[in-house]
Image (cartoon, rainbow, N blue to C red):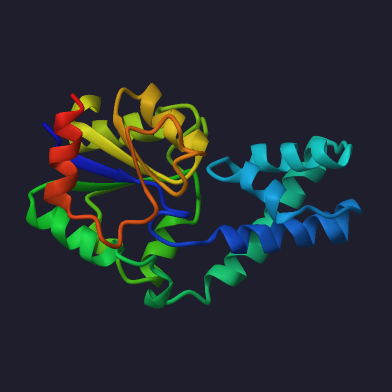
Amino acid sequence: MTKAFLFDLDGVIVDTAHFHYQAWRRLANEKLGFDISEEFNESLKGVSRTESLERILAHGGTTLDEATKTDYGTLKNNWYVALVNQMTPDDILPGITDFLVQTRTAGIKIGLGSVSKNARPILEKVGILDKFDVIIDGNKIAKGKPDPEVFLNGAAELGLLPEECVVFEDAVAGIEAGRRAGMKTVGIGKADILTEATLVFADLQNVQVADLIQQLKALE
């Protein structure tokens, strides 16, 4: 029986991927001496800040000492936070607010499972922090996705078994993390990319919670 929905943040609740891209691209341009494309940025979705920087350095054939990596990660985050601070409730993705209302009405718990260390202030900025029963973010985990830690911690804090939770993700790494946690997964995006998800929707705008639960049950 489904007792909780665990949502990723970026690309599911709000779209901050473009803010990450702007900040990472600025770092690459100003500090590393090369450019990164939007296509490359797709490979950073659902990945921690540290791992994202490692991928960018490898992409540019560049190496840095650990102290500089830390400094650059902090600098990128400062630029990102400055962009995030401009967010409003208008930045919530279509259908999310109604879907959360439906979820609560159905008696299903709501959790956040995000590697972002800025998840809580983002939810506060867009006005839905109080909708979540638990928030597991980058400040509460040691391993980023595709490790299942973030979702297993969410289930634990809710007092539920992994199989009682459904993960909502837009990234391949997030879908893998949900699957490794032993949870059903709902992909938000393109079916040809999120091939390992239990179900895939372009967005949640026209998805009804009751119908979704029935679809998931039929796949058991």
- Residue 21 vs residue 131, the one in the foreground: 21
User: Where in the figure is residue 61, as x and y percent of width and height?
Assistant: 89, 37
- Left or right side of 191 for 111: left
| Residue 173: image location, x then y, percent | 51, 34
* Residue in the image at 32% along x and 32% along y: 198
Question: Quick check: 209 left or right of 182?
Answer: left
Label total for image: 0
- Residue 175 sits above or below residue 187 on the image: above
Viewer-proximal residue among 53 and 217: 217
Q: Image check: 31 left or right of 184?
A: right
Quarter of image, res 162:
top left
Depth order, front residue of 194/150: 194
Residue in the image at 86% along x and 61% along y: 30
Where does the image place residue 90, in percent across and percent down from the top left? 40, 77
The residue located at (42%, 27%) in the rendering is 148
* Position above or below: 52 against 19: above
Q: Residue at x 79, y 57 (%)?
A: 27
Q: Residue furthest front?
A: 192
Q: Quadrant of residue 76?
A: bottom right
Residue 105 x %, y %: 8, 57
- The C terminus is located in which quarter? top left
Q: Is residue 146 left or right of residue 58?
A: left
Quadrant for the N terminus in the image: top left
